[in-house]
Amino acid sequence: MSILVTGGAGYIGSHTVLELLEAGHDVVVVDNLSNGSQEALHRIEAITGKSARFIEGDVRDRTLLDEIFATYPVEAVIHFAGLKAVGESVNRPLAYYDNNVHGSLVLCQAMAAAGVFKFVFSSSATVYGPDAPVPYVESMPRGRTSNPYGTSKAMIEQVLTDLCRADDRWSVALLRYFNPIGAHPSGLIGEDPQGIPNNLMPFIAQVAVGRLPELSVFGNDYPTEDGTCVRDYLHVVDLAIGHVQSLASLAAPGVHTYNLGTGQGYSVLEMVETFEQVTGQKVPYRFAPRRDGDLAAFWADASKAERELGWRAERGLREMLRDTWHWQKKNPNGYRE
Ligand code: NAD
Ligand code: WQD
């Protein structure tokens, strides 16, 4: 298939571009490089011997999108482009609604005008909201959201659902990711956050490599086994393969919702301890107050993706941590070298 990948120079997008190329698809990437790097695409070429076409630009630029659809025989779109920092979204709601919601609307309008109706969307476990019982199952309703980032994801899911209801030419896969970590085993592509990382795994990796002095563990009084929060971490390569396999669901019209997780949760302390065991690196940490908005524990019921797509996360925690460290050690400053 010929596939347009928005945000394909970012963390999950770049790993997905690699798996799409390996699976024999033609790939066009559009990315405004606000949080991605073209170097990732060069490295994908070095790994696979195949290349994606790269267009630097913004998904809110309708003229550019029209040109792309007129130039390339795009059959499906995988939409990663957007802003993703929960805390920042509270302070910059307009930027988040503009990038995420408005960007998705412009993209869908351009697709409809070009006669392209297959769409894969990067959604998030956050749409289940704080009151959902674990494990999260796709049949549960979306819950209330507590920050503009999460609300933007829920809004886009609703827009895409309404679109499918109105016009049965559309087929949409809503992929709800749990906590992606890790990197390609080559160590050539990985997560490269700008500034101080917000997320646990890049923070641990930067402490281990000496860029940051210590990890703050946010809260040790949660109702979990060791008092720290539990999450469903999955290997980014498994997640990328999940996108390739989700394309099969687009053969049928309508909305297809899938959790992409392992179904298993680990606590913050388990992450630190296992990282130390796997890599032999010390990760100094101290306990700090709870972070606003964090939930104690959640993980996926990932059985629907296995049943319907034949997808299952194959890579375990040790592999996720080994590959994170491999990438971090090889690229202590990310792509900026
Ligand atoms: P990322 O920031 O690494 O990738 C996003 C890419 O989109 C970047 O390369 C950025 O330059 C580009 N981009 C941003 N706004 C754009 C715009 N308006 N036009 C064109 N390009 C634009 O993030 P990621 O971790 O790879 O996440 C990808 C998607 O998955 C996002 O939509 C994110 O919300 C979603 N998601 C991520 C996680 C996670 O934990 N990483 C979890 C759930 C969902
Ligand atoms: C994991 C755990 C923290 C950093 C976020 C988004 C979610 C999705 C994935 C996009 C929590 C603890 C973290 C640190 C810590 N993104 N932690 N010290 O919050 O589960 O999910 O990213 O859709 O929507 O909310 O991931 O990696 O930030 O945190 O103790 O320095 O690690 O409290 O328990 P989270 P995370």
Image: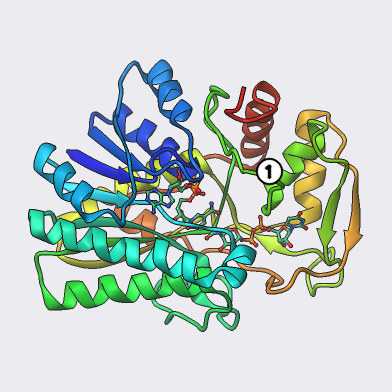
Q: Quadrant of ligand 2?
A: bottom right
> In this rendering, is residue 62 above or below 294?
above
Rendered location of residue 49, percent (x, y): 34, 15
Q: Nearer the viewer, residue 83 or 128?
A: 83
Q: Is residue 48 left or right of residue 331?
A: left
Rendered location of residue 109, percent (x, y): 18, 63
- Quick one: quadrant of the C terminus? top right
Image-quadrant location for residue 282: top right
Residue on which the image places disc 1: 202
Q: Which residue is drawn at 74% across and 64% down?
A: 229
Q: How many labels does the image show?
A: 1
> In this rendering, is residue 221 above or below 47?
below
State whether residue 136 appears in this view. no
Image-quadrant location for residue 85: bottom right
Q: Residue at x 36, y 35 (%)?
A: 17
> In this rendering, is residue 210 above or below 175?
above
Give the amino acid at mark 1. Pro
Rendered location of residue 1, percent (x, y): 17, 38
State whether residue 154 appears in this view. yes
Q: Nearer the viewer, residue 291 or 48?
A: 291
Rendered location of residue 298, percent (x, y): 62, 68
Q: In this view, does 229 lie to the left or right of 171?
A: right
What colouring style does the render use? rainbow
